Image: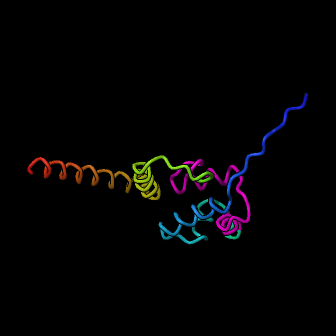
Amino acid sequence: MQMKREKLFYDRLEAGMRLRKWRTYYGWTRREVAERCGLTEKYYSDIERGSCGMSVETLISLSKLYGFTMDYLIYGEKEDEDSDKKRLLLSGLSRLSPEKQDYCLQMLFLFMERITVEEEKQ
């Protein structure tokens, strides 16, 4: 007995639009994204235009670079607004050296402590 295999598809155009949205948000060029992910600029450009699909390796690489899940990249399923904020923070930190990450975290904790103290005064 042969089992039918359901083919699974995703909207490449929509996925490409999500990538373009976040790339422009960060102010990156297609070339910069391609280099960071080990892709050719043409291949990345084709992905953004939706004219070709992505390998699993490319999905993983792009998801890590932008700091979102593969589900979001493929299907557009968002977690929640807090996840967007966390993704922005993590993505920004991940582009820094470990020393600068530590410095940013120290500054963030100091800033949060100051806000808490000011709120308590009010």
Q: Main secondary structure of the magenta part?
A: helix
The one nearer the camera, 52 or 13, is: 13
Q: How many labels does the image show?
A: 0
Tell me residue 18's x, y (percent): 57, 61
Q: Image check: 70 left or right of 87? A: right
Tell me residue 67's x, y (percent): 50, 53
In the image, what residue occupies the spot 63% across and 63% down?
16
Most extreme residue toward the top is 1
Q: Image check: 69 left or right of 59? A: left
Q: Image check: 118 left or right of 63? A: left
In the image, what residue occupies the spot 32% across and 54% down?
103
Q: Over which residues does the magenta segment extend?
A: 43-72
In the image, what residue occupies the spot 43% across and 56% down?
88
In the image, what residue occupies the spot 51% across and 50% down?
78
Residue 66 in the magenta stretch? The answer is yes
Tell me residue 5's x, y (percent): 81, 38
The one nearer the camera, 57 or 118, is: 118
Residue 40, compared with residue 9, is above or below; it is below
Image quarter in which the N terminus is found:
top right
Tell me residue 32's x, y (percent): 57, 68
Residue 23 in the magenta stretch? The answer is no
Most extreme residue toward the right is 1
Render colour scheme: rainbow
The one nearer the camera, 66 or 36, is: 66
The one nearer the camera, 75 or 64, is: 75
